[in-house]
Image (spheres, grey):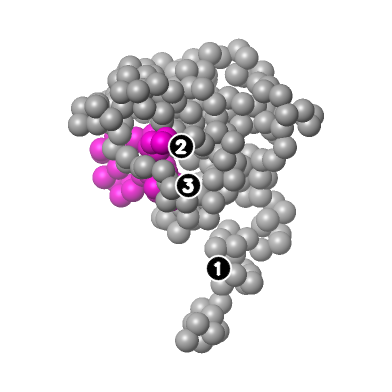
Amino acid sequence: MQALLQLLYPPQCLSCGGLVDSDFALCPECWRDTPFITGLVCDSCGTPLPGEDDATVHCDDCLTIARPWAQGRAALLYRDRGRDIPLALKHGDRTDLAGPAARWLLRAAQPILRPGMILAPVPLHWLRLFRRRYNQSALLSAALARLAGLDHVPDLLIRSRRTPTQDGRDRDGRFRNVTGAIRAHPRHAPRLKGAEILLIDDVMTSGATLAAATEACLAAGAMRVSVAVLARVAKDA
């Protein structure tokens, strides 16, 4: 039966739809064009850095901007297929990408995972969630939590104010846009006190949204917050 199914429905590349050897895989061309982040990275945002030192290092952005979270990692650079895949997950109804993307994210986030961590997505406002029908960050965090064997709380945070899109805003504008827009869900307030949280998002640009979400966790009593994103917008990358 398995062989018959593979004959009728042969595995296809996650990105281009070409034939591949196994399910949930990328073809050689798409794999080549997918900028996985490896090697030395910024300990705060996961941006790749030159060198091979194992010491804790930070990129220029994270030396300039005070990050409220403790550590951060990213699986992909936001370019080429590393841009196409998050956009397909977010806007193209490609919810099937969440599982494979979570495996890439697990590999990137492994150094910052800690026992007992609670995973939670950056929230969408309910109107945006109604229109999109799903929160792509919640799909990623749920899949990652299953792979890592950690707790997942999809509504740990809520977006209490609908914010305009961040597109086209400069760094300061992005931070102003989300100030005060995210807070902890009252139902989960006891669980947040003293907890270690890993926040999940699909793409990090300035880090403004993740900063607002982190500050909401810390204000509710979380002991430590880290972040992990599928793709990171990086200068000169």
- What amino acid does circle 2 point to? Pro
What's drawn in magenta, residue-wise? 116-144
Residue labelled with disc 2: 115
Q: Does the CB distance between marks 1 and 2 fall below 8 Å?
A: no
Q: Which mark is residue 23?
A: 1
Residue 35 x %, y %? 67, 45
Q: Does the CB distance between marks 1 and 3 fall below 8 Å?
A: no
Marks 3 and 2 sit apart, C-alpha to C-alpha, by 10 Å
Report whether residue 210 is seen: yes
Residue 87 lies in the magenta stretch? no
- Closer to the observer: label 1 or label 3? 3
Q: What is the quadrant of residue 10 in the picture?
A: bottom right
Residue labelled with disc 3: 148
Q: Secondary structure at mark 2?
A: loop
Horizontal arrangement in the rendering, residue 139 relative to residue 67 (left or right) = left
Report whether residue 182 is seen: no
- Looking at the image, tell me whether mark 1 or mark 2 is earlier in sequence order: 1
Q: Which mark is residue 14?
A: none
- What amino acid does circle 3 point to? Ala
Q: Residue at x 51, y 36 (%)?
A: 113
Residue 125 x %, y %? 29, 34
Residue 172 x %, y %? 49, 15
Q: Residue at x 62, y 49 (%)?
A: 81
Compare residues 157 and 224 and report the one nearer the observer: 224
Label 2 neighbour load within 10 Å: few <14, some 14-19, many 20+:
few
Residue 138 lies in the magenta stretch? yes
Compare residues 90 and 149 and report the one nearer the observer: 149
